[in-house]
Image (tube, rainbow, N blue to C red):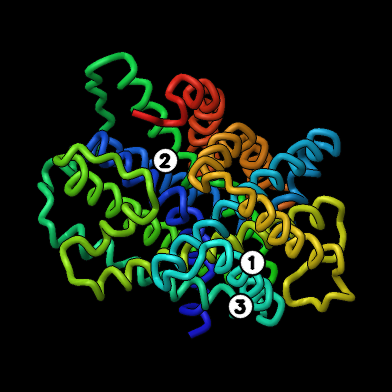
Amino acid sequence: MKSLLGVTLGIMTALGGFVDLGQIVFTTQAGALFGYRLLWAIAIGTIAIIVYMEMCGRVAVVAREPVFSVVRTRLGKRLGLVTLIASNLVNLITCAAELAGVAIVLHLLTAWPERLVMIGSTLLLAGLVMLCRFQWIERIFGLSGMLMVVFAVAAVTLHPDWHQVARGLLPTMRPSSPGQGLLYAYFAVGIFSAMLMEYEVHFYSSGAIEEDWKPKDLGENFMVASLGSLLGSLLTVAMLVLGALIFLPRHIFPNLLSTAVWAGAYPFAQKALIVSLLGALACIAGAAVETALSSGYNLCQFFNWHWGKNLPIRSAPVFHATWLGTLVFGLAIALIGIRPLDLINYSIIFGMVIMPLTYYPILRMAADKGIMGQYVNTRANSIVGMFFLVLITAAAVAAIPLMIVTHCGRP
């Protein structure tokens, strides 16, 4: 039972990264523009996040060093501090977008004013995080996020051409114009980077220490990282397939969260729409909590201050002030009125730019036999990790130019 409940850490981590506000809309848009031709980006992103999430968990368990402790050690204080500031700014922007997304879903469910529900839901999330232990936070958002399975059921119900779906696992680009090719590249980079957002591994490695995993639990670490990521990947595939089946034939570009969520209930009745909205609400709210807690983890781990969701406020005051401050300032940004999808697009692209500075130190630490001992990377682990690091670096270089020339993915 402990192992079963432990999977909720991987589920919450993956759903908060794979199925947040940006990914729900972004992946549906990709399907609406390119059909199944970007499924390969989801497949590569899934394997990459499993590889690095497992490494993060293993390093956290064996060396008792979460991600930002590793960043400080391997990059040095100066470059590490730049990475910390950039990562927490990305967390703040993402949190603001997710809080706005929660308000949109609640408005669709209740018809209450968005600003009112945004303030109320933020207070509710802050109270929930304050009162619940870490294990219950991951269980609440991990298990409630399972409602998103309705998207997978909807995709299968619409009977896609499975041969064409399988062909989408191989990169193919047939642009009708140079602009179309750049748009394809933008969505490929965006999908890949959204599945590897840094706060996923920040949260996961910190969660492994919060749950006091030991070396004997490393089998569970691999299971949790794999099952959570595979579930998130399955739902991401389902959203892309729905975009291809529902919006592509009708030449509709879904640029609203409400439109993308509606796709999950398309083959069914109104009750299914409520289920898809509740599933989206759980995932988006979970992403807001994940980014807020990750900000507290990052800051305290870098400066070696006391941290931990299960520690009382007086024992870890900076940690608690940081996650709460992220929610408060995120709410303030969201209330300004910036479109949440614009915020999330910027966070994905800028997160991609700094991504190598998170994953390179993890790879180095996991391959250090002096620290990891018998749990050091195998040669195969290191080769695969280096392959994905090269892809991450290439995507980081391409991210901002693609964002500029495609006007943030506008067709």
Q: Amino acid at mark 1?
A: Gly
Vertical order, 352 against 172 (above or below):
below
Locate residue 178 relative to residue 124 in the image: left or right. Answer: left
Task: Residue at 49% x, 49% y: name it.
Answer: 49
Label at residue 191: 2
Label at residue 77: none
**Secondary structure found at label 1:** helix
Q: Nearer the viewer, residue 365 or 122?
A: 122
Task: Residue at 79% x, 56% y: name it.
Answer: 301
Disc 1 or 2, which lies upstream in sequence? 2
Vertical order, 142 against 358 (above or below):
below
**Secondary structure found at label 3:** helix
Disc 1 to disc 3, how far (Cα)? 9 Å
Image label count: 3
Disc 1 to disc 2, how far (Cα)? 25 Å
Q: Amino acid at mark 2?
A: Ile
**Secondary structure found at label 2:** helix
Q: Nearer the viewer, residue 266 or 107?
A: 107
Tag 1 residue: 207
Tag 3 residue: 135
